[in-house]
Amino acid sequence: MKRNILRVLTIVLFLVLGGSVVLAHVPYFEHKDFTEENPFMVRKSIEQSIAVYSFLAFDSGDVDVYQFTIENRARIFVETIVPVCEFYEDFLPSFAIVGPGLPLPDGFYILPFDIPDEYGAIVISNFEDEGERPTFYEFFGNKNYYQGPTFDEFVEMPGTYYIYVWDPENIGGDYVLIIGDEEIWELNDIVRGFIYTPQIREGKELHTDECGN
């Protein structure tokens, strides 16, 4: 019975979104600030593709924290993207993967967080190149986004890992953190898609009126 319901919901969502569910990430919203005390928890497979629509508070030095655990060697894919609009053209969030067995970053980086003992960190900086930032259209959210930096590597050591996201310039703004790249949709993911996709397409996840659709 549950399997039949899942099939029906998948077909309906596919038709409603014009087929975009096949290319989509499972959506999540940052309803409360993701901190070290209250991080976003990746509760399913780290390979499942999810999109967390998040926000770094303006002019505040805000840092968002995400947490996941692996039991075996795993491929970790992480990417940050930012909505395209003039208001965010200088907003360039960086991120770091922090976990056991990773190397310590060199002294070039000034990190807005402490690295736990016996942990290391891989810092993925978001530097602005000369010329216009590359963009792409994302049908699921009905928006153009600035392409951001990515991390796509295998990590070997089991344990708890963290993703820290911050803006070195303390500008702040809306961004999307993509985790995983395998399209895995379970029943509750499809329901989540029904709830959040219309809001995303209407721009209700944004914290400024300067980036309206």
Image: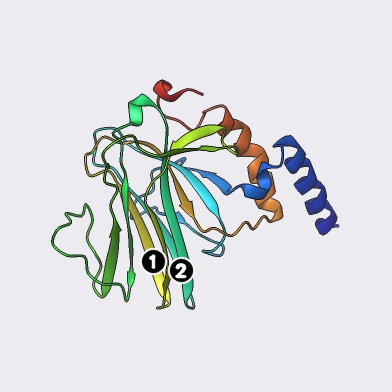
For mark 2, give the secondary structure.
strand
Instruction: Identify the residue at the far left of this view.
Output: 107
* Kind of residue at disc 1: Tyr
Q: Earlier in the sequence, mark 2 or mark 1?
A: 2
Q: Which residue is mark 2?
A: 69
Residue 161: which numbered mark, if any?
1
Q: How is the image coloured?
A: rainbow
Q: Nearer the viewer, residue 21 or 3?
A: 21
Query: Residue at image x 53%, y 45%?
Result: 28
Residue 9, horizontal then vertical, whole percent:
77, 46
Q: Quadrant of residue 100?
A: bottom left
Q: Nearer the viewer, residue 150 or 161?
A: 150
Query: Residue at image x 51%, y 48%?
Result: 51
For mark 1, give the secondary structure.
strand
CA distance separating discs 2 and 1: 6 Å
Whether residues under marks 2 and 1 lie with C-beta atoms below 8 angstroms apart, the answer is yes
